[in-house]
C-alpha cells in the first residue's frame, strides 16, 4: 500500500513538472516572438525616420545650391546675416 501511494505521488509529481516545463517553454517562445516583432517594428520606424531626414537634408542642400532658400516667406539672398 505504501509503495503504491509513493508510486502514484511520483507519477503525479513527474507529470506536473513536465506540464510546467511545456508551459514555460511555450511562454518563452511567445515572448521571443513578441520581442522579434518589436525589434522589427522599431527598425522599420527608424528606417522611415532616417529616410525622411535624408529627404529633408537633400531638399536643404538643393535649396542652398540653387539659392532658393525660403525664410519667412521671402527668398533669402544671404543666410549668414
Image: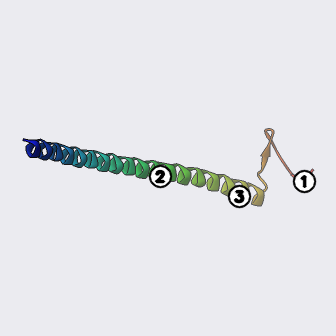
Between disc 1 and disc 3, the foreground one is 1
Q: Secondary structure at mark 3?
A: helix
Residue 47: x %, y % from top left: 54, 54
**Mark pair 1, 3: CA separation:** 17 Å
Q: Residue furthest front?
A: 2
Question: Are the residues at dot 3 and dot 2 in contact (C-beta closer than 8 Å)?
Answer: no
Quadrant for the N terminus in the image? top left
Q: Is 57 displayed left or right of 42 in the figure?
A: right
**Mark pair 3, 2: CA separation:** 34 Å
Residue 60: x %, y % from top left: 72, 54
Task: Tell which of 73 and 46 is nearer to you.
Answer: 46
Q: Secondary structure at mark 1?
A: loop
Residue annotated with mark 3: 62
Question: Are the residues at dot 1 and dot 3 in contact (C-beta closer than 8 Å)?
Answer: no
Residue 9: x %, y % from top left: 16, 42
Q: Is 5 displayed left or right of 17 in the figure?
A: left
Residue annotated with mark 2: 39
Classed neighbour count for the residue bearing mark 1: other residues with Cα under 10 Å, few (<14), some (14–19), many (≥20): few
Task: Tell which of 19 and 9 is nearer to you.
Answer: 9
Residue annotated with mark 1: 80
Residue 35: x %, y % from top left: 43, 49
Task: Tell which of 18 and 62 is nearer to you.
Answer: 18
Q: Residue furthest bottom?
A: 65
Point out the tag, 3 or 2, that comes first from the N-terminus.
2
Between disc 1 and disc 2, the foreground one is 2
Residue at 10% x, 46% y is 3
Point out the tag, 1 or 3, that comes first from the N-terminus.
3
Which color scheme did the rendering employ for the protein? rainbow
Q: Secondary structure at mark 2?
A: helix
Amino acid at each position: 500500500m505504501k509503495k503504491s501511494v509513493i508510486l502514484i505521488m511520483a507519477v503525479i509529481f513527474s507529470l506536473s513538472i513536465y506540464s510546467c516545463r511545456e508551459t514555460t517553454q511555450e511562454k518563452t517562445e511567445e515572448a521571443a516572438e513578441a520581442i522579434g516583432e518589436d525589434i522589427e517594428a522599431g527598425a522599420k520606424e527608424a528606417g522611415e525616420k532616417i529616410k525622411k531626414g535624408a529627404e529633408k537634408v537633400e531638399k536643404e542642400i538643393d535649396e542652398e545650391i540653387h539659392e532658393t532658400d525660403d525664410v519667412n516667406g521671402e527668398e533669402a539672398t544671404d543666410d549668414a546675416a
